[in-house]
């Protein structure tokens, strides 16, 4: 069961990824406008500078935000502490559950062995 904070965190992260996608689309659009301007017989320096600047700005912002998302995913994948995750706790609980099941099996085997041995 997830808490509202975790759901909000996931929704915020998805929104950030959508924003990154929009920046990439905008960067590609600006690159296209730059190429279009360059294909003219007499390109305007002002338009070239504007489109190139927009392209570089959007590309830089997308790169920075993607790096942030990748760092977060690296923390999740390497089981480091981060906000909103219960993976580590669930994994420990699963390991403890398996250990308890194995100990229980061994105890049952000991009880069975002791009860079948004849008393001397």
Image (cartoon, grey):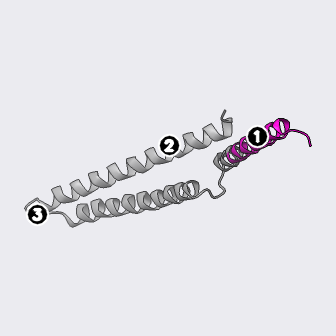
Residue at x 68% of width, y 47% of height? 95
Residue range highlighted in magenta: 95-120
Tell me if residue 102 is in the magenta stretch.
Answer: yes
Residue assigned mark 1: 109
Measure the alpha-carbon separation of dots 1 and 3: 90 Å
Quarter of the C terminus within the rendering: top right
Residue at x 45% of width, y 57% of height? 66
- Left or right placement of residue 45 versus residue 62 in this view: left
Q: Nearer the viewer, residue 81 or 49?
A: 81
Residue 89 is situated, as x and y percent measured from the top left of the image, at: 70, 47
Residue 1 is situated, as x and y percent measured from the top left of the image, at: 66, 32
- Left or right placement of residue 62 versus residue 51 in this view: right
Element type at marker 2? helix
- Left or right placement of residue 43 versus residue 71 in this view: left
Which mark is drawn over residue 14? 2
Measure the alpha-carbon separation of dots 2 and 3: 43 Å
Q: Which residue appears farthest toward the right when viewing the image?
A: 120
- Left or right placement of residue 35 versus residue 69 in this view: left
Q: Nearer the viewer, residue 22 or 120?
A: 120
Residue assigned mark 3: 42
Residue at x 68% of width, y 43% of height? 94
Q: Nearer the viewer, residue 33 or 70?
A: 70
- Choose top left, top right, bottom left or bottom right for residue 2: top right
Q: Up-down: is 49 above or below 8?
A: below
Measure the alpha-carbon separation of dots 1 and 2: 51 Å
Element type at marker 1? helix
Label located before the other in sequence (1 or 2): 2
């Amino acid at each position: 069961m997830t808490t509202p904070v975790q759901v909000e965190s996931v929704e915020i992260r998805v929104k950030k990824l959508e924003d990154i996608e929009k920046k990439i689309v905008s960067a590609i659009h600006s690159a296209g406008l730059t190429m279009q301007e360059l294909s003219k017989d007499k390109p305007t320096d002002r338009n070239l500078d504007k489109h190139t600047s927009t392209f570089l700005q959007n590309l830089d912002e997308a790169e920075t935000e993607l790096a942030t998302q990748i760092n977060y995913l690296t923390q999740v994948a390497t089981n480091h502490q981060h906000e909103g995750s219960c993976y580590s706790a669930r994994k420990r609980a699963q390991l403890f559950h398996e250990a308890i099941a194995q100990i229980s099996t061994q105890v049952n085997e000991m009880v069975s062995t002791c009860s079948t041995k004849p008393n001397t």
